[in-house]
Image: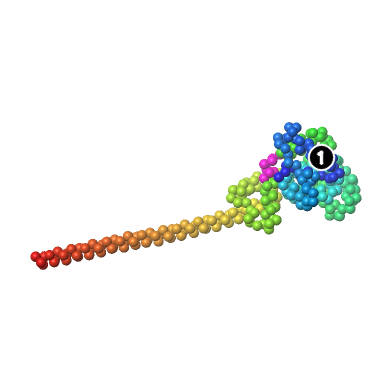
Amino acid sequence: MSDIFISYSRQNGEFMNDLWTALRKGHETGLTERELDIWIDSEDIEWSEDWWARVVKGIEETNNFAVIISSDYLASDVCNAELELARQYNKRIIPIVCQRVVEEERVAKLEARRWKRGDKALSGEQWQFLRRLNWINFERMEFADGVKAVVESIFDDVKHKDYHTQLMQRALQWDREDRNTSYLLRGLQVDTAQSWLDQAVQKKPRPTQLQSEYISASRMVQNRRQRYLLVGVSAALIITAVLAVVALRQSVAAVNALATSEARGTVVAQERNQAQSLALAANA
């Protein structure tokens, strides 16, 4: 799980490298308490690896998704696809401006790349989304101040984002495995997830629909298991009670039989003694 995934256009590679270097060395300069785990394609995709599958996994496993905003970024189909996926997963988006976006320039670059109409609409929608966020604008601040702002965003509500990422990974695995119940949460995990969900609706990033469905399915299956367990325990108690009654009856019957046997033995002994007494009397 990474602290931050940096999404950028190749045309802004120099700025990305400067930012990556500053963040990576943050623990050495006292900016961060520990070394950050930073995902960038040039470092985290091996040669001959399925690059898009690796990108998807990288976005799934990150707590924060940094967008290096520029006209080139908005004109890139790959960058737009990355941002769309991060939004789908409700990742914490950190908008970083390295280059002022001119609308005419953005549209011209889209046209130059011969995007299809649907892709152009997506780029426009992504731009409208990014415009609503509070940017970390490196054009209007010192570079060091911008880096500090990025770090503050990374460490904002880390516990919430950590759990959001972990739960999203499990929910995605469950969904990809045809929602097999063996991938659901169990025991205390269900209570922990439900408690997180109840509080997370007031936080950012908010829970996804998939996460809510995953927790709900886990709760439903656990309740079903508990009902089955309750039925099983109840049945066992009933069987135990019946066996106890039977055993008690058998014990009473055995005691009665023993008492009857002893009584009969006493009568026989008395009859025998009486006969012996009569015989002695006759002989006398």
- Residue 245 percent coordinates (x, y): 40, 60
- Is residue 161 covered in magenta? yes
Does 27 sit above or below residue 116? above
Q: Quadrant of the image for the N terminus? A: top right
Picture quadrant where residue 35 is located: top right
Give the farthest residue toward the left.
284
* Residue beneath the point at 28% across and 63% down: 261
Give the residues drawn in magenta, as a range.
Answer: 156-163
Please give the residue where the numbered disc 1 appears in the rendered image. Answer: 17
Q: Is residue 39 visible in this depiction of the protein?
A: yes
Figure quadrant of residue 100: top right
Residue 52 at least partly seen: no
Depicted 19 relative to depicted 106: above or below: above
Which element type, helix, strand or loop, lies under badge 1?
A: helix
- The percent position of residue 185, horizontal first and vertical second, equals 62, 51
**Farthest-out residue, top:** 30
Task: Give yes or no for residue 247 being in the magenta stretch.
Answer: no
Of the pair 244 and 44, the residue shown nearer to us: 44
Which residue: 76% across, 36% down? 25
Q: Quadrant of residue 142?
A: top right
277 with respect to 40 (left or right): left
From the viewer's perspective, is 136 left or right of 204?
right
What residue sits 82% from the left and 46% below the top? 127
Q: Mark 1: which amino acid?
A: Asn
- Badge 1 crowding class, 10 Å Cα cut-off, few under 14, some 14 to 19, many 20 or more, is few
Tell me the chief SS of the magenta region. helix
Q: Which x, y percent locates residue 182?
A: 63, 55
What residue is shown at x 86% (from left), y 48% (from top)? 75
Q: Position of residue 11 (x, y in %)?
A: 86, 44
